[in-house]
Amino acid sequence: MSACPNTRCQHLIITGFILIIHYSSIIPLNFLFAWRYFRSKKSTNAINIIAWVTVTAMAVGTAALVVVLSIFNGFEGLVKTLYSSFYPDVRITAAQQKVMLLDDATISKIKLLHNVKAMSMVVEENVHLQNGDYRTNAVIKGVDEAYMQTSGVQDMITAGKFETGSSETPGMVLGVGVEGALNLMSDRAMNPVTAYLPKRGITSNNPLDAISTVNIQPTGSFSIQQDFDNKYVITNLAILKEMLGIKANEYSAAEIRLKDPKAEKETIAALQQLLGKGYLVENRYQQNRSLFGVMQVEKWAIYGILSLILIIASFNMIGALTMLVLEKEQDIQILQAMGAGKSFIQRIFLTEGVLLALVGSVIGIILALIFTYLHVTFKLIPLQGSFVIDYYPVSIYVTDILLIVATVFVIALLASWLPSLKAARQKTSLRSQ
Protein backbone atom coordinates (compact mmCIF):
# COMPACT_ATOMS: atom_id res chain seq x y z
CA MET A 1 0.00 0.00 0.00
CA SER A 2 3.01 2.35 -0.37
CA ALA A 3 1.39 3.91 -3.46
CA CYS A 4 -1.62 4.86 -1.34
CA PRO A 5 -0.38 6.83 1.64
CA ASN A 6 -3.83 7.68 3.05
CA THR A 7 -6.76 5.58 4.23
CA ARG A 8 -9.16 7.00 1.64
CA CYS A 9 -7.05 5.67 -1.20
CA GLN A 10 -6.88 2.24 0.42
CA HIS A 11 -10.68 2.16 0.74
CA LEU A 12 -10.99 3.01 -2.97
CA ILE A 13 -8.69 0.14 -3.95
CA ILE A 14 -10.55 -2.37 -1.75
CA THR A 15 -13.91 -1.16 -3.05
CA GLY A 16 -12.71 -1.45 -6.64
CA PHE A 17 -11.43 -4.96 -5.95
CA ILE A 18 -14.85 -5.98 -4.56
CA LEU A 19 -16.53 -4.54 -7.67
CA ILE A 20 -14.25 -6.66 -9.89
CA ILE A 21 -15.12 -9.81 -7.93
CA HIS A 22 -18.83 -9.00 -8.15
CA TYR A 23 -18.94 -8.51 -11.88
CA SER A 24 -16.94 -11.68 -12.44
CA SER A 25 -19.23 -13.82 -10.26
CA ILE A 26 -22.88 -14.45 -9.46
CA ILE A 27 -22.57 -13.32 -5.82
CA PRO A 28 -24.68 -10.19 -5.10
CA LEU A 29 -22.51 -7.16 -4.48
CA ASN A 30 -24.39 -6.13 -1.35
CA PHE A 31 -23.65 -9.56 0.14
CA LEU A 32 -19.93 -9.16 -0.54
CA PHE A 33 -19.87 -5.86 1.32
CA ALA A 34 -21.98 -7.26 4.17
CA TRP A 35 -19.72 -10.32 4.50
CA ARG A 36 -16.64 -8.11 4.55
CA TYR A 37 -18.15 -5.94 7.31
CA PHE A 38 -19.15 -9.04 9.23
CA ARG A 39 -15.68 -10.60 9.16
CA SER A 40 -13.50 -7.50 9.47
CA LYS A 41 -12.32 -6.20 12.81
CA LYS A 42 -13.94 -2.89 13.76
CA SER A 43 -12.01 0.10 15.00
CA THR A 44 -14.28 0.25 18.03
CA ASN A 45 -14.23 -3.03 19.96
CA ALA A 46 -17.75 -2.39 21.31
CA ILE A 47 -19.16 -2.97 17.81
CA ASN A 48 -17.59 -6.42 17.69
CA ILE A 49 -18.91 -7.27 21.15
CA ILE A 50 -22.47 -6.13 20.37
CA ALA A 51 -22.43 -7.98 17.03
CA TRP A 52 -21.43 -11.26 18.68
CA VAL A 53 -23.92 -10.68 21.49
CA THR A 54 -26.55 -10.41 18.75
CA VAL A 55 -25.38 -13.65 17.14
CA THR A 56 -25.38 -15.41 20.53
CA ALA A 57 -28.85 -14.13 21.41
CA MET A 58 -30.22 -15.29 18.07
CA ALA A 59 -28.57 -18.69 18.55
CA VAL A 60 -30.06 -19.10 22.02
CA GLY A 61 -33.52 -18.01 20.86
CA THR A 62 -33.44 -20.29 17.82
CA ALA A 63 -32.20 -23.26 19.85
CA ALA A 64 -34.95 -22.70 22.43
CA LEU A 65 -37.61 -22.60 19.71
CA VAL A 66 -36.36 -25.78 18.05
CA VAL A 67 -36.05 -27.72 21.32
CA VAL A 68 -39.37 -26.63 22.85
CA LEU A 69 -41.34 -27.13 19.64
CA SER A 70 -39.70 -30.55 19.20
CA ILE A 71 -40.72 -31.58 22.71
CA PHE A 72 -44.24 -30.32 22.05
CA ASN A 73 -44.30 -32.29 18.79
CA GLY A 74 -43.14 -35.35 20.71
CA PHE A 75 -46.00 -35.07 23.19
CA GLU A 76 -48.47 -34.38 20.38
CA GLY A 77 -47.31 -37.48 18.52
CA LEU A 78 -47.48 -39.54 21.70
CA VAL A 79 -51.05 -38.42 22.43
CA LYS A 80 -52.10 -39.13 18.85
CA THR A 81 -50.58 -42.61 19.11
CA LEU A 82 -52.42 -43.29 22.36
CA TYR A 83 -55.72 -42.03 20.96
CA SER A 84 -55.26 -44.04 17.79
CA SER A 85 -55.29 -47.16 19.96
CA PHE A 86 -58.92 -46.46 20.81
CA TYR A 87 -60.30 -44.37 17.96
CA PRO A 88 -60.55 -45.97 14.48
CA ASP A 89 -59.26 -44.56 11.20
CA VAL A 90 -62.83 -43.79 10.12
CA ARG A 91 -66.05 -43.78 12.14
CA ILE A 92 -69.61 -43.78 10.78
CA THR A 93 -72.46 -42.47 12.96
CA ALA A 94 -75.96 -41.09 12.45
CA ALA A 95 -75.93 -37.40 11.61
CA GLN A 96 -78.83 -36.49 13.92
CA GLN A 97 -79.79 -39.49 16.03
CA LYS A 98 -78.05 -41.55 18.70
CA VAL A 99 -78.67 -44.86 16.90
CA MET A 100 -78.21 -45.47 13.17
CA LEU A 101 -79.76 -48.08 10.91
CA LEU A 102 -77.31 -50.01 8.76
CA ASP A 103 -78.63 -53.07 6.95
CA ASP A 104 -76.56 -56.08 5.91
CA ALA A 105 -76.51 -55.10 2.23
CA THR A 106 -75.03 -51.67 3.01
CA ILE A 107 -72.48 -53.19 5.38
CA SER A 108 -71.39 -55.59 2.64
CA LYS A 109 -70.98 -52.71 0.16
CA ILE A 110 -68.81 -50.82 2.65
CA LYS A 111 -66.59 -53.85 3.22
CA LEU A 112 -66.09 -54.20 -0.54
CA LEU A 113 -64.56 -50.72 -0.89
CA HIS A 114 -60.95 -51.18 -1.97
CA ASN A 115 -59.37 -49.21 0.92
CA VAL A 116 -61.44 -50.81 3.71
CA LYS A 117 -59.34 -53.37 5.57
CA ALA A 118 -61.76 -54.21 8.40
CA MET A 119 -65.11 -53.00 9.73
CA SER A 120 -66.58 -53.42 13.20
CA MET A 121 -70.09 -52.60 14.42
CA VAL A 122 -70.38 -51.12 17.92
CA VAL A 123 -73.01 -49.95 20.38
CA GLU A 124 -72.29 -47.51 23.23
CA GLU A 125 -74.40 -46.62 26.25
CA ASN A 126 -74.01 -45.21 29.74
CA VAL A 127 -73.94 -47.89 32.41
CA HIS A 128 -73.93 -48.14 36.19
CA LEU A 129 -71.60 -50.87 37.48
CA GLN A 130 -71.62 -52.52 40.90
CA ASN A 131 -69.23 -54.88 42.61
CA GLY A 132 -70.50 -55.49 46.13
CA ASP A 133 -70.29 -52.16 47.93
CA TYR A 134 -68.30 -50.53 45.13
CA ARG A 135 -70.16 -48.63 42.42
CA THR A 136 -69.22 -46.40 39.49
CA ASN A 137 -70.64 -44.97 36.28
CA ALA A 138 -69.01 -45.67 32.93
CA VAL A 139 -69.64 -46.01 29.21
CA ILE A 140 -70.11 -49.59 28.07
CA LYS A 141 -69.11 -50.41 24.50
CA GLY A 142 -70.43 -53.54 22.82
CA VAL A 143 -68.17 -54.82 20.04
CA ASP A 144 -68.26 -57.67 17.53
CA GLU A 145 -65.58 -60.16 16.52
CA ALA A 146 -63.99 -57.75 14.01
CA TYR A 147 -63.22 -55.16 16.68
CA MET A 148 -59.72 -56.53 17.30
CA GLN A 149 -58.90 -55.78 13.63
CA THR A 150 -60.05 -52.14 13.79
CA SER A 151 -58.79 -51.21 17.26
CA GLY A 152 -55.53 -51.36 19.17
CA VAL A 153 -57.09 -51.85 22.61
CA GLN A 154 -56.00 -55.49 22.75
CA ASP A 155 -52.38 -54.30 22.57
CA MET A 156 -52.90 -52.17 25.68
CA ILE A 157 -54.04 -54.98 27.98
CA THR A 158 -52.28 -54.73 31.35
CA ALA A 159 -53.87 -57.75 33.07
CA GLY A 160 -55.96 -60.72 31.98
CA LYS A 161 -56.89 -60.90 28.30
CA PHE A 162 -59.13 -59.21 25.76
CA GLU A 163 -62.20 -61.45 25.88
CA THR A 164 -65.79 -60.23 25.51
CA GLY A 165 -67.45 -63.65 25.66
CA SER A 166 -70.83 -64.39 24.12
CA SER A 167 -74.46 -63.45 24.74
CA GLU A 168 -74.79 -66.47 27.06
CA THR A 169 -71.56 -65.86 29.00
CA PRO A 170 -70.57 -62.24 28.44
CA GLY A 171 -67.11 -60.98 29.38
CA MET A 172 -65.95 -57.46 30.06
CA VAL A 173 -62.62 -55.66 29.59
CA LEU A 174 -62.33 -52.61 31.84
CA GLY A 175 -60.20 -49.48 31.83
CA VAL A 176 -57.83 -49.55 34.78
CA GLY A 177 -59.56 -46.50 36.26
CA VAL A 178 -62.95 -48.24 36.23
CA GLU A 179 -61.30 -51.40 37.53
CA GLY A 180 -59.87 -49.48 40.49
CA ALA A 181 -63.19 -47.77 41.23
CA LEU A 182 -64.85 -51.21 41.48
CA ASN A 183 -61.99 -52.56 43.62
CA LEU A 184 -61.25 -55.36 41.18
CA MET A 185 -57.50 -54.96 41.03
CA SER A 186 -56.79 -57.05 44.13
CA ASP A 187 -58.77 -60.12 43.04
CA ARG A 188 -59.06 -61.05 39.36
CA ALA A 189 -61.00 -64.25 40.08
CA MET A 190 -63.88 -62.09 41.32
CA ASN A 191 -67.59 -62.62 40.94
CA PRO A 192 -69.32 -61.06 37.93
CA VAL A 193 -69.94 -57.32 37.98
CA THR A 194 -73.58 -56.23 37.83
CA ALA A 195 -74.38 -53.78 35.05
CA TYR A 196 -77.54 -51.61 35.08
CA LEU A 197 -78.62 -50.43 31.63
CA PRO A 198 -81.56 -48.37 30.32
CA LYS A 199 -84.15 -50.09 28.11
CA ARG A 200 -85.42 -48.44 24.95
CA GLY A 201 -89.11 -47.82 24.28
CA ILE A 202 -90.39 -48.69 27.79
CA THR A 203 -93.34 -46.65 29.07
CA SER A 204 -94.18 -47.54 32.64
CA ASN A 205 -94.93 -45.77 35.88
CA ASN A 206 -92.40 -48.00 37.60
CA PRO A 207 -88.84 -46.71 36.90
CA LEU A 208 -87.41 -50.18 37.54
CA ASP A 209 -89.20 -51.50 34.45
CA ALA A 210 -86.95 -49.27 32.30
CA ILE A 211 -83.75 -50.79 33.72
CA SER A 212 -82.02 -53.94 32.49
CA THR A 213 -79.69 -55.86 34.75
CA VAL A 214 -76.98 -58.23 33.61
CA ASN A 215 -74.01 -59.91 35.29
CA ILE A 216 -70.79 -59.70 33.29
CA GLN A 217 -67.55 -61.48 34.12
CA PRO A 218 -64.44 -59.23 34.09
CA THR A 219 -61.75 -60.79 31.91
CA GLY A 220 -59.05 -58.14 31.68
CA SER A 221 -58.09 -54.49 31.94
CA PHE A 222 -56.48 -51.98 29.59
CA SER A 223 -54.47 -48.81 30.08
CA ILE A 224 -54.35 -46.30 27.22
CA GLN A 225 -54.95 -42.80 28.47
CA GLN A 226 -56.77 -41.42 31.48
CA ASP A 227 -59.78 -40.27 29.45
CA PHE A 228 -60.37 -43.86 28.33
CA ASP A 229 -59.13 -45.71 31.39
CA ASN A 230 -61.58 -43.95 33.72
CA LYS A 231 -64.54 -44.08 31.36
CA TYR A 232 -64.85 -47.19 29.19
CA VAL A 233 -65.61 -50.87 29.56
CA ILE A 234 -65.89 -53.20 26.56
CA THR A 235 -68.23 -56.15 26.29
CA ASN A 236 -70.04 -58.41 23.83
CA LEU A 237 -72.17 -56.64 21.22
CA ALA A 238 -75.00 -59.20 21.22
CA ILE A 239 -75.66 -59.08 24.98
CA LEU A 240 -75.56 -55.30 25.02
CA LYS A 241 -78.07 -54.99 22.16
CA GLU A 242 -80.31 -57.51 23.89
CA MET A 243 -80.26 -55.64 27.20
CA LEU A 244 -80.84 -52.26 25.57
CA GLY A 245 -83.61 -53.52 23.30
CA ILE A 246 -81.86 -52.44 20.10
CA LYS A 247 -82.98 -53.99 16.81
CA ALA A 248 -80.78 -56.25 14.69
CA ASN A 249 -79.67 -53.59 12.17
CA GLU A 250 -79.32 -50.73 14.65
CA TYR A 251 -75.91 -49.59 15.92
CA SER A 252 -74.26 -46.63 17.58
CA ALA A 253 -71.40 -46.56 15.08
CA ALA A 254 -69.35 -48.47 12.54
CA GLU A 255 -65.58 -48.37 12.99
CA ILE A 256 -63.33 -48.87 9.98
CA ARG A 257 -59.64 -49.57 9.58
CA LEU A 258 -58.08 -48.50 6.30
CA LYS A 259 -55.50 -50.29 4.20
CA ASP A 260 -53.87 -46.98 3.29
CA PRO A 261 -54.54 -44.11 5.76
CA LYS A 262 -53.07 -41.65 3.24
CA ALA A 263 -56.09 -42.25 0.99
CA GLU A 264 -58.63 -41.52 3.74
CA LYS A 265 -60.10 -38.49 1.94
CA GLU A 266 -61.08 -40.56 -1.08
CA THR A 267 -62.46 -43.34 1.12
CA ILE A 268 -64.50 -40.92 3.25
CA ALA A 269 -65.90 -39.32 0.08
CA ALA A 270 -66.87 -42.75 -1.25
CA LEU A 271 -68.51 -43.71 2.06
CA GLN A 272 -70.42 -40.43 2.23
CA GLN A 273 -71.70 -40.91 -1.31
CA LEU A 274 -72.75 -44.46 -0.52
CA LEU A 275 -74.53 -43.64 2.75
CA GLY A 276 -76.02 -40.23 2.01
CA LYS A 277 -76.52 -37.10 4.14
CA GLY A 278 -78.16 -38.95 7.01
CA TYR A 279 -74.78 -40.34 8.11
CA LEU A 280 -71.65 -38.68 9.46
CA VAL A 281 -68.31 -40.05 8.26
CA GLU A 282 -65.32 -38.79 10.26
CA ASN A 283 -61.60 -39.41 10.28
CA ARG A 284 -59.57 -39.65 13.50
CA TYR A 285 -58.93 -35.89 13.62
CA GLN A 286 -62.62 -35.08 13.22
CA GLN A 287 -63.54 -37.51 15.99
CA ASN A 288 -61.31 -35.49 18.34
CA ARG A 289 -61.71 -31.93 17.08
CA SER A 290 -61.53 -30.34 20.51
CA LEU A 291 -58.35 -32.20 21.53
CA PHE A 292 -56.40 -31.57 18.32
CA GLY A 293 -57.70 -28.00 18.13
CA VAL A 294 -56.40 -27.23 21.62
CA MET A 295 -53.05 -28.84 20.81
CA GLN A 296 -52.65 -26.64 17.74
CA VAL A 297 -53.55 -23.50 19.70
CA GLU A 298 -51.00 -24.44 22.37
CA LYS A 299 -48.30 -24.97 19.77
CA TRP A 300 -48.87 -21.58 18.14
CA ALA A 301 -48.98 -19.92 21.57
CA ILE A 302 -45.61 -21.48 22.46
CA TYR A 303 -44.19 -20.37 19.12
CA GLY A 304 -45.42 -16.79 19.71
CA ILE A 305 -44.04 -16.60 23.25
CA LEU A 306 -40.62 -17.97 22.33
CA SER A 307 -40.43 -15.68 19.30
CA LEU A 308 -40.31 -12.79 21.80
CA ILE A 309 -36.76 -13.96 22.64
CA LEU A 310 -35.77 -13.31 19.04
CA ILE A 311 -37.52 -9.94 19.03
CA ILE A 312 -35.65 -8.90 22.18
CA ALA A 313 -32.41 -10.07 20.59
CA SER A 314 -33.12 -7.87 17.59
CA PHE A 315 -32.67 -4.75 19.75
CA ASN A 316 -28.99 -5.69 20.06
CA MET A 317 -28.93 -5.91 16.27
CA ILE A 318 -30.29 -2.37 15.93
CA GLY A 319 -27.51 -1.09 18.18
CA ALA A 320 -24.81 -3.07 16.39
CA LEU A 321 -25.92 -1.90 12.93
CA THR A 322 -26.30 1.73 14.03
CA MET A 323 -22.73 1.74 15.34
CA LEU A 324 -21.56 -0.02 12.16
CA VAL A 325 -23.15 2.72 10.03
CA LEU A 326 -21.16 5.30 11.97
CA GLU A 327 -18.03 3.14 11.64
CA LYS A 328 -18.42 2.79 7.86
CA GLU A 329 -19.39 6.39 7.13
CA GLN A 330 -16.32 6.88 4.96
CA ASP A 331 -17.06 3.70 2.98
CA ILE A 332 -20.59 4.92 2.35
CA GLN A 333 -19.33 8.24 1.03
CA ILE A 334 -16.86 6.50 -1.28
CA LEU A 335 -19.63 4.26 -2.64
CA GLN A 336 -21.86 7.28 -3.21
CA ALA A 337 -19.04 9.05 -5.02
CA MET A 338 -18.63 5.99 -7.26
CA GLY A 339 -22.31 6.15 -8.19
CA ALA A 340 -23.95 3.80 -5.69
CA GLY A 341 -27.59 4.64 -5.10
CA LYS A 342 -29.40 4.88 -1.78
CA SER A 343 -31.20 1.58 -2.34
CA PHE A 344 -27.90 -0.26 -2.86
CA ILE A 345 -26.39 1.14 0.34
CA GLN A 346 -29.54 0.27 2.23
CA ARG A 347 -29.38 -3.32 0.90
CA ILE A 348 -25.81 -3.64 2.21
CA PHE A 349 -26.85 -2.99 5.79
CA LEU A 350 -30.08 -4.95 5.47
CA THR A 351 -27.95 -7.87 4.30
CA GLU A 352 -25.57 -7.30 7.23
CA GLY A 353 -28.48 -7.58 9.70
CA VAL A 354 -29.85 -10.70 8.01
CA LEU A 355 -26.33 -12.18 8.01
CA LEU A 356 -25.96 -11.63 11.76
CA ALA A 357 -29.35 -13.24 12.42
CA LEU A 358 -28.93 -16.20 10.07
CA VAL A 359 -25.46 -17.04 11.41
CA GLY A 360 -26.98 -17.07 14.90
CA SER A 361 -29.95 -19.17 13.79
CA VAL A 362 -27.73 -21.75 12.05
CA ILE A 363 -25.61 -22.07 15.20
CA GLY A 364 -28.79 -22.38 17.29
CA ILE A 365 -30.25 -25.10 15.04
CA ILE A 366 -27.02 -27.10 15.19
CA LEU A 367 -26.92 -26.81 18.99
CA ALA A 368 -30.60 -27.84 19.21
CA LEU A 369 -30.02 -30.89 16.99
CA ILE A 370 -27.04 -31.95 19.09
CA PHE A 371 -29.02 -31.51 22.30
CA THR A 372 -32.04 -33.46 21.07
CA TYR A 373 -29.80 -36.29 19.87
CA LEU A 374 -28.09 -36.48 23.25
CA HIS A 375 -31.47 -36.28 25.00
CA VAL A 376 -32.94 -39.16 23.03
CA THR A 377 -29.76 -41.21 23.45
CA PHE A 378 -29.10 -40.58 27.15
CA LYS A 379 -32.56 -39.37 28.35
CA LEU A 380 -31.16 -36.15 29.75
CA ILE A 381 -34.51 -34.81 31.02
CA PRO A 382 -36.54 -37.56 32.76
CA LEU A 383 -40.30 -37.38 33.29
CA GLN A 384 -41.33 -37.48 36.92
CA GLY A 385 -44.22 -39.66 38.06
CA SER A 386 -45.99 -42.53 36.35
CA PHE A 387 -46.27 -42.19 32.57
CA VAL A 388 -46.06 -44.33 29.47
CA ILE A 389 -42.50 -43.11 28.85
CA ASP A 390 -39.79 -42.05 31.30
CA TYR A 391 -38.34 -39.04 29.41
CA TYR A 392 -39.58 -36.06 27.42
CA PRO A 393 -40.37 -37.17 23.87
CA VAL A 394 -38.95 -35.14 20.99
CA SER A 395 -39.85 -35.01 17.32
CA ILE A 396 -38.14 -32.52 15.00
CA TYR A 397 -40.15 -31.39 11.96
CA VAL A 398 -38.42 -29.80 8.98
CA THR A 399 -41.42 -27.48 8.58
CA ASP A 400 -40.82 -26.13 12.10
CA ILE A 401 -37.16 -25.40 11.33
CA LEU A 402 -38.13 -23.63 8.09
CA LEU A 403 -40.72 -21.60 10.00
CA ILE A 404 -38.13 -20.61 12.61
CA VAL A 405 -35.60 -19.59 9.94
CA ALA A 406 -38.28 -17.53 8.18
CA THR A 407 -39.18 -15.89 11.49
CA VAL A 408 -35.53 -15.00 12.13
CA PHE A 409 -35.28 -13.59 8.59
CA VAL A 410 -38.34 -11.36 8.98
CA ILE A 411 -37.26 -10.11 12.43
CA ALA A 412 -33.77 -9.36 11.07
CA LEU A 413 -35.20 -7.37 8.14
CA LEU A 414 -37.43 -5.32 10.43
CA ALA A 415 -34.62 -4.67 12.92
CA SER A 416 -32.20 -3.71 10.15
CA TRP A 417 -34.58 -1.33 8.43
CA LEU A 418 -33.92 1.86 10.43
CA PRO A 419 -30.09 1.55 10.56
CA SER A 420 -29.97 0.74 6.84
CA LEU A 421 -32.24 3.70 6.08
CA LYS A 422 -29.94 5.94 8.07
CA ALA A 423 -26.98 4.64 6.08
CA ALA A 424 -28.78 5.30 2.78
CA ARG A 425 -29.44 8.92 3.78
CA GLN A 426 -25.79 9.71 4.44
CA LYS A 427 -24.73 12.83 2.54
CA THR A 428 -21.74 12.78 0.22
CA SER A 429 -18.99 15.05 1.46
CA LEU A 430 -15.71 13.78 0.04
CA ARG A 431 -12.79 16.19 0.44
CA SER A 432 -9.28 15.63 -0.79
CA GLN A 433 -6.60 15.14 1.82
Image (cartoon, rainbow, N blue to C red):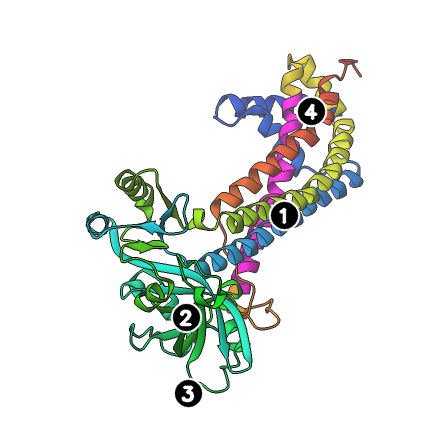
Q: Residues within 10 Å of mark 1 (few under 14, many from 20)?
A: some
- For the N terminus, give its image quadrant: top right
How far is mark 1 from mark 3, CA to CA?
49 Å
Residue type pointed to by label 1: Ile
Which mark's residue is nearer the viewer, 1 or 3?
3
The image shows residue 317, relative to residue 259, as above or below, that is above
Disc number at residue 116?
none
Where residue 320 appears, as percent x and y from the top left, is: 75, 35
Instruction: Identify the residue position indicated by label 2 in the image.
Output: 156
How far is mark 1 from mark 4, CA to CA?
47 Å
Instruction: Identify the residue position indicated by label 4 in the image.
Output: 11
Q: Residues within 10 Å of mark 4 (few under 14, many from 20)?
A: some
Where residue 344 appears, as percent x and y from the top left, is: 63, 19
How far is mark 2 from mark 4, CA to CA?
73 Å
Question: Bounds of the magenta span?
Answer: 346-375
The image shows residue 227, relative to residue 300, as above or below, that is below
Q: Nearer the viewer, residue 145 or 405?
A: 145
How far is mark 3 from mark 4, CA to CA?
92 Å
Kindly indicate whether the residue at mark 2 contacts the one at mark 1 (C-beta within 8 angstroms): no
Instruction: Identify the residue position indicated by label 1 in the image.
Output: 302
Residue type pointed to by label 3: Ala
